[in-house]
Image (cartoon, rainbow, N blue to C red):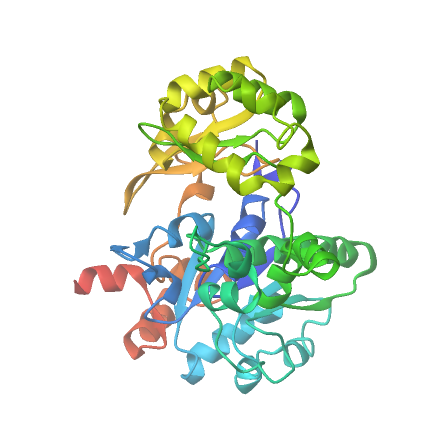
């Protein structure tokens, strides 16, 4: 697919966001054809240092910044700020995720930018929103998992609230942000009108949990499980997740475990009865599952038409015959971090080796190219690099 076939070909995006949520939105815009300039501090987006670092990257910076061009600026210098304002004046979309008031101090907030760029689509992401008692509090994914109630519905067997082991809120916020920017761009194309979109981690995870929140309102803390037997079962060599809530599936599961008696036992024979006696039934079924291997139980459940899946590691997922057969994960050699998996983005062509859309830039890797594009010559660019107003990748490489 050529760039001209992508929906946002020709759209200019200034991505001044850091971390995961804003960069995720910017990456999706890039994958759909937008020219995304990643505007980051001289030291780089702090999202480059989430977890273990690999050069200037980490496992989060590579997937969420691919397809972008990086320019590194010192906002506190007059020259760096002038460049940022020039880029903002020419952008169709601006993404930022600073605390309320920060962009205004630099004259890069929505009211300031629209003086020269009235049709801009401007996205502001915060932790708690632009107003309210928590507006200026810092917020991370883990903080918001606790604050939003998500951890209250993710507990271990002892009732301890658990954090979901990935940046689920940041990632979902990026998706919701992209969902908001895309129709705003359509509106801009149709009417010429821009828009200031404000959202937050708190709003995104609220929307993500809408059904659970309705359930809580209707049922309180005494929420019934989604079905019985439903859950993760330990086998002799691993774990499997089983959904046997329907009568026919429950009967088949009992037969597989050699416990036909449970299928006709009046304490468990109906959906309502299984809900009422969940604890006793699940204990018996779990003991039965421990006597089988994951592979044997998986095969028997499939033959019996019972919904199930082994609990995979990511390595298991990569090597699964179905995943391979449908080419669901592309393997890309990244110049700085090596070979990495890029799962396909739904509705989008798979990543291809050598495609610029697969490359996540180093800090200031495209500073010279971007500055040339807005009228600076090489002498002026070299001077900006020497003054510290701009971080230029090739100069940093030469210094090392």
How many numbered marks does the figure carry? 0
Q: Residue furthest right?
A: 191
| Left-right relation of 317 to 246 | left
Q: Nearer the viewer, residue 144 or 387?
A: 144
**Taking 310 as reference, is 193 above or below it?**
below
Q: Residue furthest front?
A: 266
User: Residue 279 location in percent, x, y?
Assistant: 52, 42
Residue at 35% across, 60% down:
48
| Left-right relation of 101 to 69 | right
Residue at 64% across, 65% down:
203
Q: Residue furthest top?
A: 303
Which part of the image, by quadrant, shows the N terminus?
top right
Q: Nearer the viewer, residue 395 or 154?
A: 154
User: Residue 90 location in percent, x, y?
Assistant: 61, 66
Answer with the quarter of the image where residue 352 lies.
top left
Which part of the image, by quadrant, shows the C terminus?
bottom left
| Left-right relation of 127 to 49 | right
**Taking 214 as reference, is 347 above or below it?**
above
User: Residue 265 location in percent, x, y?
Assistant: 61, 26
Whether residue 349 appears in this view of the structure is yes
**Taking 237 as reference, is 13 above or below it?**
below
User: Residue 147 location in percent, x, y?
Assistant: 54, 69
| Left-right relation of 60 to 25 | left
Q: Nearer the viewer, residue 307 or 141?
A: 307
Residue at 69% across, 30% down:
270
Whether residue 92 appears in this view of the structure is no
Q: Nearer the viewer, residue 316 or 248?
A: 248
């Amino acid at each position: 697919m050529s760039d001209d076939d992508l929906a946002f070909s020709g759209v200019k995006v200034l991505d001044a966001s850091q971390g995961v949520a804003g960069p995720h939105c910017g990456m999706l815009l890039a994958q759909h054809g937008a020219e995304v300039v990643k505007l980051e501090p001289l030291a780089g987006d702090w999202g480059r240092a989430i977890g273990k670092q690999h050069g200037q990257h980490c496992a989060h910076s590579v997937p969420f910044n691919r397809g972008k061009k990086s320019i590194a600026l010192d906002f506190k210098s007059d020259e760096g700020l002038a460049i940022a304002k020039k880029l903002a004046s020419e952008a169709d979309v601006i993404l930022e995720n600073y605390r309320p008031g920060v962009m205004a101090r630099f004259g890069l907030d929505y009211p300031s930018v629209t003086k020269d760029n009235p049709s801009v689509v401007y996205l502001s992401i915060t932790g708690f929103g632009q107003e309210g008692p928590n507006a200026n509090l810092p917020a991370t994914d883990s903080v918001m998992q606790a604050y939003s109630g998500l951890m209250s519905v993710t507990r271990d067997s002892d009732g301890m609230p658990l954090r979901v082991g990935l940046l689920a809120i940041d990632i979902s916020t990026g998706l919701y942000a992209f969902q908001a920017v895309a129709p705003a761009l359509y509106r801009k194309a149709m009417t010429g009108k821009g828009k200031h979109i404000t959202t937050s981690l708190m709003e995104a995870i609220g929307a993500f949990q809408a059904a659970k929140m309705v359930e809580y309102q209707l049922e309180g803390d005494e929420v019934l499980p989604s079905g019985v037997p439903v859950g993760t079962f330990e086998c002799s060599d691993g774990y499997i997740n089983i959904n046997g809530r329907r009568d026919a599936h429950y009967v088949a599961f009992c037969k597989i475990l050699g416990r036909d008696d449970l299928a006709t036992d009046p304490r468990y024979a109906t959906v309502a009865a299984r809900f009422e006696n969940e604890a006793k039934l699940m204990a018996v079924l779990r003991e039965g599952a421990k006597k089988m291997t994951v592979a044997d139980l998986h095969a028997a459940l499939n033959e019996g038409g019972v919904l199930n899946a082994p609990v995979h590691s990511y390595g298991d997922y990569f090597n699964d015959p179905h995943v391979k057969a449908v080419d669901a994960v592309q393997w890309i050699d990244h110049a700085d971090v090596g070979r990495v998996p890029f799962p396909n983005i739904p509705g989008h062509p798979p990543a291809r080796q050598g495609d610029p859309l697969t490359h996540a830039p180093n800090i200031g890797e495209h500073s010279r190219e971007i500055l040339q594009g807005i009228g600076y010559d090489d002498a002026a660019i070299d001077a900006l690099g020497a003054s510290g107003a701009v971080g230029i990748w090739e100069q940093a490489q030469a210094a090392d």
